[in-house]
Amino acid sequence: MSTPVFEELEKGQQIGTRELSFSRADLIRYAAASGDHNPIHWNDRFAREVGLDGVIAHGMLTMGSAVDLVSVWAGDPGAVVDYQSRFTKPVPVPDAASGSPETPTARLQLSGKIGAVDAEQRRVRIDLSVELLTEPAAEEEPGGGAPLDPVRTKVLAKSQAVVQL
């Protein structure tokens, strides 16, 4: 992808979308890389004992994955000079029903658009949407017809990155 041309950018312009998947193996790799070995990220029993429905993805894994959309669009991760977000819901990563722990069991839909353009500083604010996609319950499908669209749950709010161009 080429570097965006500042003079061609305007508020409301889409910068891209991406779908990501996480598996239990991804969580273990992230724990090793980050040093965050909290058992809520790998142990169902412990996660339930502390009030969760099961294992959840690391918050920083979710945030980092989201801002990567901006870094790729900008053409330089160093161009992202500020990034903030608020967690609204955890990202559950259930154990795969069968097969390898590499089997993805959580899907995120990421999208970004330009929320503001600062011509004086040559900065743009990118507003990110980060949603968990889950399949609707089987009983929700009308008479065995076509599958329903995934249920979308916002997992990050006020997720914004400032890019210096």
Image (tube, helix red, strand yellow):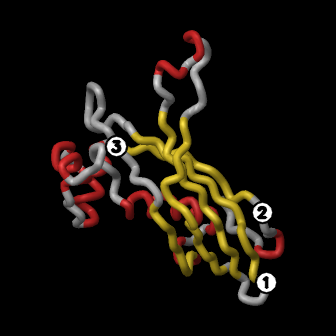
Q: Is residue 158 left or right of residue 132?
A: right
- Name the mark nearer the viewer: 1 or 3: 3
Residue at 81% across / 69% down in the picture? Answer: 10
Q: Which numbered tag is attached to residue 119?
A: 1
Q: Secondary structure at mark 3?
A: loop
Residue at 60% across / 61% down in the picture? Answer: 128
Amino acid type of disc 3?
Val
* C-beta proximity under 8 Å, tags 2 and 1: no
Q: In the image, is residue 151 above or below residue 87?
A: above
Q: Is residue 49 left or right of residue 96?
A: left
Q: Is residue 88 left or right of residue 110?
A: left
Q: Earlier in the sequence, mark 2 or mark 1?
A: 2
- Quadrant where the C terminus sits is bottom right
Q: In the image, is residue 163 above or below residue 100?
A: below
Where's residue 45, x and y in %? 17, 44
Q: Quadrant of residue 152?
A: top right
Tell me the distance, in whole angstroms, between the alpha carbons under discs 3 and 2: 32 Å
Circle 2 is placed at which residue position?
Answer: 12
Where's residue 133, x and y in %? 51, 40
State the count of labels: 3
Q: Secondary structure at mark 2?
A: loop
* C-beta proximity under 8 Å, tags 1 and 3: no
Circle 3 is placed at which residue position?
Answer: 93
| Residue 28 in view | no
Tell me the distance, in whole angstroms, between the alpha carbons under discs 1 and 3: 41 Å
Q: Nearer the viewer, residue 48 or 58?
A: 48
Looking at this view, name the residue that lies furthest to the bottom. Answer: 120
Where's residue 83, x and y in %? 53, 74
